[in-house]
Image (cartoon, rainbow, N blue to C red):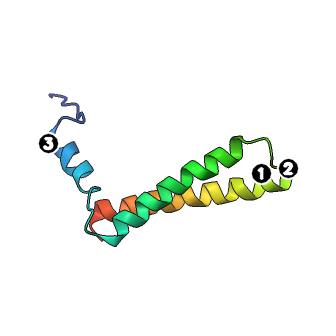
Amino acid sequence: MQHRSQSIHSPGAQKGLARLWQPRRTLFWLMVAVNLLSTLWGWLLRSDTLNTLGMAVVGVLALSNALAGMWLAWRLLRGD
């Protein structure tokens, strides 16, 4: 039995990654905006200006944002 590893250079993997790049779809730009917002949440979580409640609220928002970004990417990959 031959084992064939799949790398990012194999045609199947590129096909999957190419399905994420769909700049004509609104879903793509929504995913980009959500991922850019992740940068803001990460910066806020690392800042020392938030108290415990603020950290909890921003932490929940950051997790929700990450889940939303993964859901949008999954929808793009599936072709919804």
From the viewer's perspective, tell me whether residue 30 is left or right of residue 80.
right
Circle 3 sits in a helix, a strand or a loop, which is it?
helix
* Number of the label disc, if any, that sits on residue 55: 1
**What is the three-letter code of the residue carrying label 3?**
Pro
| Mark in the foreground, 2 or 3 | 2
Residue nearest the viewer, comparing 55 with 14: 55
* Disc 3 to disc 1, C-alpha distance: 43 Å
Mark 2 lies on residue: 51
* Number of the label disc, if any, that sits on residue 42: none
To which quarter of the image does residue 7 belong?
Answer: top left
Tell me if label 2 and label 1 are in contact, CB under 8 Å: yes
* Disc 2 to disc 3, C-alpha distance: 49 Å
- Other-residue count near label 1 (Cα within 10 Å), few / some / many at <14 / 14–19 / ≥20: some
Q: Earlier in the sequence, mark 2 or mark 3?
A: 3
Please give the name of the residue rendered at 20% of the width and 44% of the height, measured from the top-left corner: 14
Q: Measured from the top left, where is residue 53 in percent x and y?
A: 84, 56
**What is the three-letter code of the residue carrying label 2?**
Asn
Q: Measured from the top left, where is residue 19 in percent x and y?
A: 24, 57
Residue nearest the viewer, comparing 31 with 77: 31
* Number of the label disc, if any, that sits on residue 11: 3
* Disc 2 to disc 1, C-alpha distance: 6 Å
- Other-residue count near label 2 (Cα within 10 Å), few / some / many at <14 / 14–19 / ≥20: few
Please give the name of the residue rendered at 23% of the width and 35% of the height, measured from the top-left corner: 6
- Other-residue count near label 3 (Cα within 10 Å), few / some / many at <14 / 14–19 / ≥20: few
Taking the view exactly as shown, the residue that stands out farthest to the top is 2
Tell me if label 2 and label 3 are in contact, CB under 8 Å: no
Q: Measured from the top left, where is residue 71 in percent x and y?
A: 45, 62
To which quarter of the image does residue 20 belong?
Answer: bottom left
